[in-house]
Amino acid sequence: MEHAKHEPTSHPLPASPGLLDRLFKLSAHGTTVKTELVAGLTTFITMAYIIFVNPNIMSASGMDAGAVFVATCIGAAIATLFMGLYANWPVGLAPGMGLNAFFAFTVVGEMGYSWEVALGAVFWSGIIFTAMSFWKIREWVLDAIPQSLRYAMTAGVGLFLGFIGLKTAGIIADSPVTLLTTGDLTQPPAWLAVACFLIIAVLAHRKIFGAVLIGVLGTTLIGLGMGIVEYNGIFAAPPSLSPTLFKLDIMGALDVGMITVILAFLFVNMFDTAGTLMGVAERAHLRRPDGTIEGLKKSLKADSASSVIGTFVGCPPVTSYVESSAGVAAGGRTGLTAVTIAALFLLSLFLAPLAGMVPPYATAGALIYVAFLMTSSLANIEWHDYTEMAPAAITALMMPLTFSIANGIAMGFIAYTVLKVATGQAARVSLGVYVLSAIFVAKFIFM
């Protein structure tokens, strides 16, 4: 009987995961390289408006617009790359809307500090935020400040942005009798800003991603067709960064009068970051079964450190963008999404001529749109409780009316403490709120 000859059976070895899979744990998060790249592109398109808006706002402080454009791209790229490689989160970061306006129009324009000193204040707020991210202080502060005041801060920054947008477009104007009045709505900047806002609002309602970017660039094209925007080209070598590089005045920001400014930068950045990262974590399914969030501490450290790094190139506070949720909705789950966003910000360095063409009225329309988004947080306030409602309303309203985020926060804290104590609810006021209220009272009395 002839024995059959059996060849050894070859069993293919499981393919070892690729470099990107190992680095970003793609398989573990149920995603692929293609999905992450598409998600990164999606997030970038939704937040790319900042490379056109930020130079327009920051140049009002005397900073070189070309250098600010480069600083915006580089600051956003470094921060987002750090978030992707260190925290492995699908989050894009860039200079914060609202904080840049506070920087340019209040700290520099109203308070009279130089933009170098204002950058120093951003540096110190970033240092404090970073230190808080390593200890339990961050949790203590977040828990100590009432929810109503947190929501009011977001809404107040939105109203502040909207006020600036309306003023920039000429939709509102100063009046010797009533302080404010309606501007000349027949002028192109006014109705083009309104058109930009309406374009963005309609596109956003129809869930067309990149609505803000489309609105800003579309309005610029309209202005170009009308002959009120000069065509300068689209691509070119990046402008020089030297006018803003390492120009921050760290020691000059240690002035006593800068305390509330530093605190304003810190609080708005901290609460905005916490809300954004928690929201992204939920959408990206980063919450573990035990309720903890994977990589949250690293993401907070990456965000806070980015504000410090950004000051060296000339950026206002760099923060996580809520637009990152668009990329997460497109399937982004890991830091590869963030790395993609960072790469696209670096490529944007060659769009300086296009950024220089975007007129103030186009960015004003974007500011008005973002303002309405931010004021929606007022819906979360307990309007039936006067001791919660009144301080929240004071916080939100006094930001635009005093043209200062810092003053709005200070007045809201003081009102909250006084109303709670006077109505027999002193036990509901945390130690942190008492301390901050005392600091703010001292600020108004002695500064």
Image: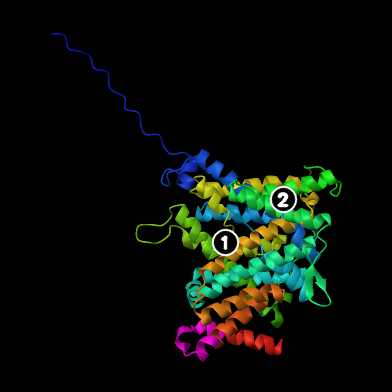
Q: Residue at x 59, y 87 (%)?
A: 438
Q: Residue at x 67, y 74 (%)?
A: 399
Q: The C terminus lies in which quarter of the figure?
A: bottom right
Splitting the image into 4 quarters, where does residue 436 fall? bottom right
Give the dominant element type of the magenta stretch: helix, strand or loop: helix
Question: Local crowd at mark 2 within 10 Å, few (<14), some, or many (≥20)?
Answer: many
Verify whether residue 379 appears in magenta: no
Does dot 2 land on a helix, a strand or a loop?
A: helix
x, y (%) of residue 123?
66, 69
Reading the image, the residue beneath label 2 is 216
Question: Local crowd at mark 1 within 10 Å, few (<14), some, or many (≥20)?
Answer: many
Residue type, mark 2 in image = Val
Q: Which residue reaches farthest top?
A: 1
Q: Nearer the viewer, residue 26 or 100?
A: 100
Above/below status of 24 relative to 142: above
Q: Which residues are magenta?
A: 419-435
